[in-house]
Image: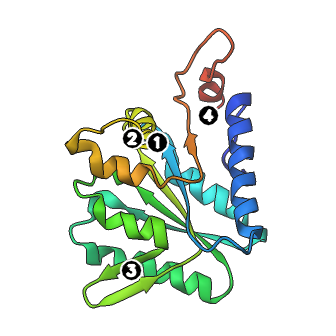
Amino acid sequence: LGDYVTLDWCHHKDINSLIKIIKDYSKDLSRKRPLNIIMIAEPGSGKSHFIKCLAKKMNYKGISAVNFNMATLQYISDLAQPLETVRNIKVVDRLPLLFLEEFDSLENFSHLLPLMWDGELHIGHGNLKLGKVVIVLAANNPDIKKTMKEAKNMQKEAVPNDNTKIADLLSRINGGIFEIPDLDLAHNDRDRRVDKVCL
């Protein structure tokens, strides 16, 4: 991805898979709701850098990135500026990639539910409609995978009350999970420390 490189074959395969998912979504004119993807990575592993490189690589497909760190969110109205930027990108007939970093730092996930389902958000008396958009929710918490499995089984099993909202949010992930593996990852068949040496 230009300035984002890896010698880890599994990671390389995951990157190509992510690119294909976004390409297929952008070409499918019947899809009007957001494509929601979870990104899981350790703090400082280059999530923002990865998104910038991904958007640059897919620029020929008309994809542009907008970043917002959810840890800075104090009021729902704080999302107005990045969502207006997303709408401006759509006006020039490009597909926005909205990158919401540290979404797992939120205490109240309910604000994100209409954004992820209908592509719109009510702020004050206004209604910001986005429609077709790629939303990447970045998390540092490795337990997100486990919570996602619970979310997918919500109808079969009861989910504890404190996890209901995050489970509801994660049940709306329709683009899958993308993981940036730890640079210290080492198994019998895989060793990401090669990337670390190269860096």
Residue 155 rendering spot, x and y as whole percentages: 40, 43
Residue wearing tag 3: 81
Does residue 102 show up? no
Q: Which callout, 4 or 3, points to the residue nearer the camera?
A: 3
Instruction: Answer few, some or many: residues within 10 Å of disc 3's Cα (few below 14, many 20 plus, some between 14 and 19).
Output: few
Which element carries disc 3, helix, strand or loop?
helix
**Residue 188 in picture, x, y percent from top left:** 65, 8
Q: Under tag 4, what secondary structure?
A: loop
Mark 1 sits on what residue?
152
Between 132 and 191, the residue placed more toward the observer is 132
Question: Where 2 sits versus 118, above or below?
Answer: above
Amino acid on which disc 3 is placed: Gln
Residue that badge 2 annotates: 140
Q: CA distance from mark 4 to mark 1?
A: 37 Å
Marks 4/1 in contact by CB < 8 Å: the verdict is: no
| Residue indicated by mark 4 | 199
